[in-house]
Image (spheres, helix red, strand yellow):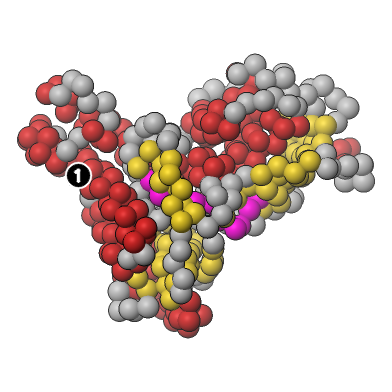
Amino acid sequence: MSILRYQKPNVKTLNKNYFDNFKTELTVFSPGRINFIGEHTDYNNGFVLPTAIDKKIFFSFKKNESKKQCNIYSKNYDAFLTIDLDNVLPSEEEWENYILGVIKELQKRNATIEGFDCIIESELPIGAGISSSAALECGIALGLNSLFDLQFPSEELIKLSRDAEHNFVGTKCGIMDQFAVVMSKEEHALLLDCESLQYELIPVDIYPYKILLLNTNISHNLATSEYNKRREECEAGIEIIKKKYPAIDSLREVTFPILEEVKSDLSATVYNRCKYVISENTRVIEAVEKLKEGDLKSLGKLMYQSHEGLRDLYNVSCAELDFLVDFTLDHEQILGSRMMGGGFGGCTINIIHKDYTKKYIEEVSSAYKKAFQIDLTAIEVNPSGGTYVERH
Ligand code: GLA
């Protein structure tokens, strides 16, 4: 990544009239996402089952008089980001990089962006594994697409938002988060084929059960480096498999007999990573069948298996997440539980009976506090529609 970093301007003069003169031209609502199952499969060309949620980031956009200067205010950080469009470079601040990265990717695709102002307010916790980052990237991308009538199709905006994260943040993420944030539909999950980007909308009809996220409020800073390492380990597996099977390009195409055949050529770690990914892909397809049949118990079992794989084979869980999943095991009102997202902290996703939710939150919060001296946050969510733009 470039070591040139942009210089922070003096924003004191900006603040004075910024809010008084703010005449919103468009509002953007960009949601977080959950994932029922299919973790770390997206960058292996596999399957995922995410959906957007009813918790969002809100953006107000307007053009300003300038050709080159953009002034973005984050209410949550109470901070301004001022951008010179002739000089878009990575920043020291992570939240700024999601925005700068998207603008750079738009510019790379010859988009004509001029000066704009934007106010951002988020109800998504950061580092919770519900993709506040993709919500931010996609909100900026769809907002600018509309403000400057850039006419990029949704799929391109999704891809360039992902590229922004690769190039400005340094996480070599897959496409799941951005896709779910933009394309989701209310009351549905997306069965996404991350190779073809074809998807099927699966109704999420789980009444009297609910989706409950439990946020560990832990975000181990291993997340980015370990994430990229997992991706490299999967790629290393493919390189070796390719020697015998040159037509294979991703773990998506690898079967268990093939994996067993090459086992002695793989390190134990790489073997475990591959085994996890192949099993997880199968689980996603099964989970969709179970969801369609209304067989929530079987769906729940698959979620537990997913967690075990992430914990024991993929090694992306942590003590706090394992505690929360284990705690559900004696509670029959919870059908399934697993860690969600990249790992090393963030939330578990739980399928829980609606009548039991309140009592369970009290019980698990107190046990978690006792074990880790950390407050747990419970977030009830519903499958919702993707990012949308409202013109004023
Ligand atoms: C993060 C990444 C996604 C995906 C998940 C793990 O959320 O951004 O692309 O790989 O981790 O499933």
Instruction: Examine the image and state in which quarter residue 140 appears.
Output: top right
Task: Report the quarter where the C terminus lies.
Answer: top right
- Residue 95 in view (yes/no): no
Indicate if the residue with disc 1 has its beta carbon within 8 Å of ligand 1.
Answer: no
Please say if 389 is above or below 148.
below
The residue at 64%/34% (across/down) is 141
Q: Which amino acid is tagged 1?
A: Lys
Bounds of the magenta segment: 48-57
Please say if 214 is above or below 346.
below
Foreground residue among 33 and 100: 33
Q: Residue 365 in the image: x percent, y percent? A: 47, 76
Decide if residue 47 is on the left or right side of residue 239.
Answer: right
Q: Residue 198 in the image: x percent, y percent? A: 42, 36
Q: Residue furthest top?
A: 110
The residue at 75%/27% (across/down) is 148
Magenta stretch mostly in which secondary structure? strand
The residue that disc 1 covers is 275
The residue at 60%/58% (across/down) is 54
Magenta run includes residue 384: no
Q: Residues within 10 Å of mark 1 (few under 14, many from 20)?
A: many
The residue at 83%/39% (across/down) is 25
Q: Residue furthest front?
A: 293
Instruction: Examine the image and state in which quarter residue 68 appears.
Output: top right
Foreground residue among 373 and 195: 195
Q: Residue 307 in the image: x percent, y percent? A: 30, 58
- Residue 184 in view (yes/no): yes
Decide if residue 15 is on the left or right side of residue 83.
Answer: right
